[in-house]
Amino acid sequence: MTRVLVITGPTATGKTALGVRLAKALDGEVVSADSMQVYKYMDVGTAKPTEDEMQGVRHHMIGVAEPTERYSVSEYVPAATKCVEDIASRGRVPIIVGGTGLYVESLILGRDFADEGSDSAERERLYAQYDALGGKKMLSLLAQYDPERAAKLHPNDKKRVVRALEIALAGSTITAHDEETKTRPPKYDARIVVLNWLDRAKLYERINLRVDEMMERGLADEVRRLMDMGFEKSTALQAIGYKELCEALRGECSVEDAVGRIKLGSRRYAKRQISWNTRYSEALRINWENFPNIDDALHASTEFFQK
């Protein structure tokens, strides 16, 4: 079984920096596990590593999708798996770096997803039906076939509602598929390192500072360019940092108000990330006190991976 090293944790904890250092130390390559870094043109707001930050280390799964694409974990896992397999086939270490918990877990477990259907015409018919009837009626329809899945979905989650209906109408259910995949052994021998701050207030302080730095680096200009390119209505621009600034640029609120809501949304997202990562009982947990000590983390993570 291929061994992989995973660096995860909430936003603003130094995952990128540690991942690069480990890749250089272990002769590895980085596979991003960030649900927003997959999109092209969205650089500042997703904290994509710059060329300088990459330090010559090859990074995969960054900027692989258009903002208009309906990109989700079901597209991510097969693409990222190919990257991991390619890296390992060349005798190098796959280092999975990112804070999107569902992406990380699904990749290391080798979770496959119920086929979204090969009939694109049927899928488009269901999307049109969703637009005509609305999310609540479509969710009620899904409940007739897969009540358990319907109970977990929000009416506004258009893509997942349509996907579940498409599979149900083809004679299966996502619920049955997910139960079957849970019984399979993991695909990779994953050594997981979880980064965080010892003091929650320090984490929030770093998140606020990071948002200020993004604004200084031109996040508002990046959002304006994306709007000018016609991506304003895309799902990708509903992400934290983009949605709020789209509203500000349309004159619906002030930039100051938008920045405040970006900080709040980012702090709330970090809380969800922390909660998700509690499931990794055998992970190496590195909690920063006053500053990220990447040298110490590099040593501890290397030992943890090699033992």
Image (tube, grey):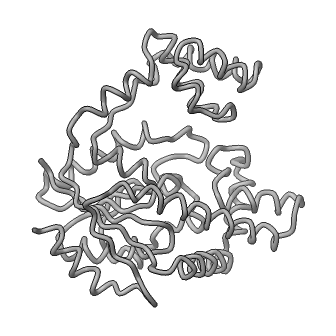
Which residue occupies the foreground of this view, 12 or 232?
12
**Residue 114 as seen in the image, left or right of residue 28:** right
Which residue occupies the foreground of this view, 118 or 240?
240
When the figure is inspected, residue 187 is found, relative to residue 285, above or below; the finding is: above
**Residue 147 as seen in the image, left or right of residue 187:** right
Residue 22: quadrant of the picture = bottom left
Give coordinates of residue 178: x percent, y percent: 38, 29
Residue 207: quadrant of the picture = bottom right
Give coordinates of residue 116: x percent, y percent: 46, 24
**Residue 104 as seen in the image, left or right of residue 37:** left
| Number of numbered callouts drawn | 0
Q: Residue at x 33, y 39 (%)?
A: 78
Q: Residue at x 82, y 69 (%)?
A: 257
When the figure is inspected, residue 97 is found, relative to residue 56, above or below; the finding is: above
When the figure is inspected, residue 294 is found, relative to residue 192, above or below; the finding is: below
Give coordinates of residue 275: x percent, y percent: 47, 58
Q: Residue at x 45, y 78 (%)?
A: 197
User: Which residue lies most toward the bottom here?
Assistant: 290
- Quarter in which the C terminus is drawn: bottom left
Give coordinates of residue 154: x percent, y percent: 65, 34
